[in-house]
Image (cartoon, grey):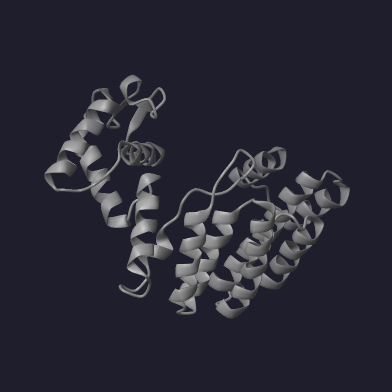
């Protein structure tokens, strides 16, 4: 976090100099492995922004070689191969390595598998996406399993009927239970939340009740947790103001901004 905080302050008001030699100089004097990992991440990002993908790739690979039990550098590299270099076959080779590491060490499994699904979509291989969804559904988590949250963009981008409908339905339920909604439904819930909010403070439970009633009228199945997650999203994006812990709806409040 020390490195990330330093980088944030630098980028917030950057001086008249290139950050790449600054990062390289700091790396040459650093010995702590976690600080080096953070510095390599920002160095690769700086190369990436400049379109120097070869240098970004070398930095990601060096980061992975320094810690072969961390799949994240390979996940970032696979994303670069897919999205910027438009090399999905190369991206698949990289992400397969990342998935193997992630499953072996129990870290960043959702992150790696989700990226594999996106690569498979680019290659028009829905059977691989279906296999990824089955793997995601079978994951269990304990305190040591660091990872990203549930994701569903690759499910929503699948052509209709391209995978087993039972798998698609099960993964849709899996996401909804975790408050991850299809884009159209998320937008509709946001509209309902904002319509229920007011310029004065209202309990989140009151807003949630209004949204649940509207969803019942429209025969939309949604959980209270999913609504609270959308309230958080609207607060994070400046559409609502909040006070207290939003995950305690009876003890927190929201209002429309002035």
Q: Residue at x 58, y 60 (%)?
A: 112
Query: In this orientation, does residue 52 appear?
Result: no
Is 134 displayed left or right of 194 in the figure? Answer: right
Quadrant showing the N terminus: top right
Coordinates of residue 159 in the picture (x, y in percent): 34, 74
Coordinates of residue 6 in the picture (x, y in percent): 69, 40
Is 13 displayed left or right of 236 in the figure? Answer: right
Is 20 displayed left or right of 27 in the figure? Answer: left
Query: In this orientation, does residue 164 appear?
Result: yes
Q: Residue at x 27, y 27 (%)?
A: 205
Q: Determine which quarter of the picture holds residue 145.
A: top right
Coordinates of residue 196 in the picture (x, y in percent): 19, 34
Q: Is 92 or 131 nearer to us in this picture?
A: 131
- Above or below residue 169? Residue 93 is below
What is the tally of numbered marks visible in this picture?
Answer: 0
Q: Is 255 or 132 nearer to us in this picture?
A: 132
- Above or below residue 249? Residue 82 is below
- Above or below residue 91? Residue 235 is above
Q: Is 28 or 147 nearer to us in this picture?
A: 147
Please, which residue is most extreme toward the left here?
217
Coordinates of residue 246 in the picture (x, y in percent): 38, 29
- Above or below residue 226? Residue 22 is below
Q: Residue at x 78, y 55 (%)?
A: 67
Q: Residue at x 27, y 44 (%)?
A: 222
Quadrant showing the C terminus: top left
């Amino acid at each position: 976090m020390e490195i990330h905080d330093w980088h944030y302050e630098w980028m917030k008001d950057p001086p008249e100099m290139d950050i790449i030699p600054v990062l390289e100089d700091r790396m040459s004097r650093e010995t702590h492995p976690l600080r080096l990992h953070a510095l390599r991440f920002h160095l690769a990002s700086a190369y990436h922004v400049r379109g120097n993908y070869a240098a970004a790739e070398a930095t990601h690979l060096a980061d992975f070689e320094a810690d072969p039990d961390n799949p994240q550098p390979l996940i970032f590299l696979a994303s670069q191969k897919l999205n910027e270099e438009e090399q999905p076959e190369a991206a698949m080779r990289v992400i397969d390595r990342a998935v193997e590491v992630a499953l072996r060490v129990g870290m960043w499994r959702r992150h790696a598998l989700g990226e594999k699904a996106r690569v498979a979509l680019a290659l028009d291989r829905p059977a691989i996406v279906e296999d990824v969804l089955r793997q995601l559904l079978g994951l269990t988590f304990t305190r040591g399993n660091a990872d990203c949250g549930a994701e569903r963009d690759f499910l929503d981008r699948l052509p209709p009927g391209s995978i087993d409908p039972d798998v698609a339905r099960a993964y849709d339920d899996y996401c909804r239970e975790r408050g991850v909604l299809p884009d159209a439904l998320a937008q509709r819930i946001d509209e309902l939340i904002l319509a229920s909010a007011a310029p004065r403070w209202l309990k989140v439970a009151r807003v949630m009740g209004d949204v649940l009633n509207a969803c019942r009228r429209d025969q939309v199945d949604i959980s209270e947790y999913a609504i609270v997650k959308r309230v958080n999203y609207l607060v994070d994006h400046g559409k609502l103001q909040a006070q207290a812990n939003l995950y305690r709806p009876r003890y927190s409040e929201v209002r429309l901004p002035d």
